[in-house]
């Protein structure tokens, strides 16, 4: 197909290649382990909060019908009446600033069981900075316990489901984006979701990917379960075809469960990137450009425009591997616990979460890692249930303080007098609400040593304020 006498044709093919490179660099990131078919059954039934040992997600919950007539699985977060069910429009990339994409993979078990709406099984943030020629990859576990805008706290993987089930603006991707933005604290420009068959076909088209398997591991093909669909990979460098690359990426039965799986996803991501950007495969990619583009365009669902895909492709080729930061919100960043309705969850440690975020989203470009909106808007979006206790010597301060905080958009659900009296105001966080704590600390001038975290997911409130003698509304 190459014809050096037709420069326009050659340039067209190279642009197609650039487009493929960019889309693949984004799209492969999103779908690697989206298709877990089975779960481990080795979770202890004791309500331990230890971080030790493997972590595996729960099995699907039974489906019920809510008051709107919408099928909703049991244990799904309920709507929060204090927060409107609406989603903002994603901010288009200007082509020069840092760009961030939320990469989504849907739960294969929902597809397999014929559910009308799916949860997300994979969430990965990809960021590219044109100024520093750097990139970042950050994996978010599906069972992270977070505030879902417009709903009560729940697992982060239910945001996609709720956006579709309640037919919100932007649907599942819109609510997933808003939830991740609020949780991680970075603006997101685009989303992308890939079908597993497109991933497998693409890996096969480029001749497989070279993986350095660190230790012996047995993987199983998607939809498998029998001896004929299993394969034991020995330690060392080997080339995996599409089906086995997917099986390797979605395997979760290792020492650290889903956290290990996230690292394998990123390992395969880098292997795909290295293969695509290898000059030796350039003639193959050019020759197969039309068919590859056709496969990817039908297997990827995204709001990323063609023009911006080309720009991202050109940018991705300029980022050296040593400038790609990688991270997983795994051990050390979360606490293993149980939700009020008895589901195993991961409770984020806010300070650790933000530390890793800042390492991945280093402020080297024109966009700082911060949620859109001011501190008050962030607090309102978090919609924490707040109890206010009058611990001062001033009668009636609780009622006045509650009225004032309510006027600021805070969700005050309980007012009472405290049995103990305090000179200084104290905050206690039970479920992980960094934006509410930040807003209250600024508004009420509360020092850091008066802010405590006491994990208690069965508490009817998320944040407790013990108003001392040092504050008056």
Image (spheres, helix red, strand yellow):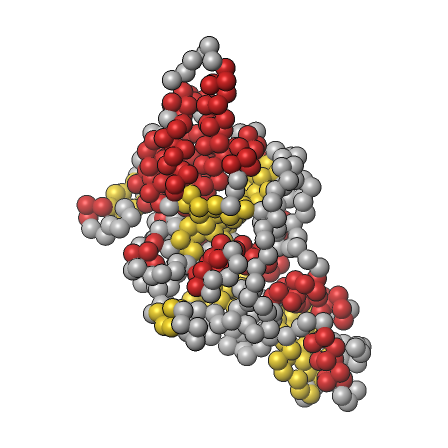
The answer to whether 247 appears left or right of 440 in the picture is: left
What residue sits 24% from the left and 46% below the top? Answer: 230
Q: Which is more toward the observer, 31 or 20?
A: 20
Q: Which is more toward the observer, 182 or 288?
A: 288
Residue 183 percent across, percent down from the top left: 57, 58
Regarding residue 124, the answer to whether it shows in the image is yes
Regarding residue 248, the answer to whether it shows in the image is no
The answer to whether 433 appears left or right of 268 in the picture is: right
Say which quarter of the image contains residue 96: top right
What residue sits 38% from the left and 68% below the top? Answer: 71
Where 462 falls versus 245 (above or below)? below
The answer to whether 350 appears left or right of 409 in the picture is: left
Say which quarter of the image contains residue 69: bottom left
What residue sits 19% from the left and 45% below the top? Answer: 228
Residue 467 percent across, percent down from the top left: 73, 79
The answer to whether 149 appears left or right of 423 in the picture is: left
Name the image quarter holding the C terminus.
bottom right
What residue sits 79% from the left and 81% below the top? Answer: 469
Where 85 falls versus 38 (above or below)? below
Where 45 falls versus 421 (above or below)? above
Name the image quarter holding the N terminus.
top left
How many numbered discs?
0
Where 92 falls versus 14 (above or below)? below
Residue 415 percent across, percent down from the top left: 66, 84
Residue 158 percent across, percent down from the top left: 45, 62
As drawn, which residue projects farthest toward the top? 5
Say which quarter of the image contains residue 274: top left
């Amino acid at each position: 197909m190459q014809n050096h006498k037709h420069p326009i044709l050659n340039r067209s093919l190279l642009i197609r290649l650039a487009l493929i490179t960019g889309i693949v660099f984004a799209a492969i990131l999103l779908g690697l382990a989206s298709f877990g078919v089975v779960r481990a059954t080795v979770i202890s039934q004791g309500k331990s909060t230890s971080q030790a040992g493997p972590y595996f997600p729960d099995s699907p919950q039974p489906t019920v019908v809510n008051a709107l007539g919408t099928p909703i699985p049991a244990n799904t977060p309920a709507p929060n009446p204090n927060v409107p069910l609406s989603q903002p429009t994603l901010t288009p990339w200007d082509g020069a600033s840092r760009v961030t994409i939320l990469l989504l993979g849907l739960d294969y078990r929902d597809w397999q069981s014929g559910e009308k709406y799916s949860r997300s099984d994979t969430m990965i943030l990809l960021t590219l900075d044109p100024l520093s020629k750097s990139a970042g990859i950050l994996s978010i576990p599906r069972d992270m316990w977070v505030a879902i805008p417009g709903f009560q706290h729940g697992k982060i993987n239910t945001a996609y489901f709720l956006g579709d089930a309640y037919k919100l603006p932007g649907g599942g991707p819109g609510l997933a984006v808003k939830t991740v933005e609020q949780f991680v604290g970075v603006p997101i420009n685009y989303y992308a979701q890939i079908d597993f068959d497109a991933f497998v076909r693409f890996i096969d088209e480029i001749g497989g990917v070279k993986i350095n398997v660190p230790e012996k591991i047995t993987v199983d093909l998607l939809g498998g379960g029998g001896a004929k669909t299993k394969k034991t990979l020995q330690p060392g460098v080997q080339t995996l075809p599409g089906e086995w690359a997917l099986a390797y990426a979605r395997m979760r039965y290792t020492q650290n469960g889903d956290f290990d799986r996230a690292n394998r996803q990123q390992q395969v991501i880098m292997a795909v990137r290295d293969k695509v950007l290898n000059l030796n495969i350039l003639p193959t990619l050019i020759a197969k450009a039309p068919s590859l583009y056709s496969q990817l365009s039908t297997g990827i669902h995204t709001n990323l425009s063609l023009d911006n895909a080309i720009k991202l492709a050109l940018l991705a080729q300029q980022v050296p591997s040593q400038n790609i930061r990688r991270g997983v919100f795994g051990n050390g960043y979360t606490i293993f616990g149980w939700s009020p309705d008895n589901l195993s969850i991961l409770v984020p440690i806010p300070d650790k979460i933000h530390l890793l975020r800042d390492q991945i989203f280093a402020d080297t470009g024109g966009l700082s890692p911060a949620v859109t909106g001011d501190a008050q808007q962030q607090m309102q979006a978090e919609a924490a249930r707040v109890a206010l206790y009058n611990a001062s010597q001033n009668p009636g301060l609780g009622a006045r303080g509650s009225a004032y905080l309510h006027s600021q958009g805070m969700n005050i659900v309980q007012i009472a007098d405290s049995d103990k009296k305090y000179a200084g105001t104290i905050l206690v966080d039970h479920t992980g609400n960094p934006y509410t704590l930040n807003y209250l600390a600024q508004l009420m001038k509360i020092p850091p040593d008066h802010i405590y975290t006491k994990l208690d997911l069965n508490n009817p409130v998320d944040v407790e304020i013990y108003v001392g003698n040092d504050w008056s509304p």
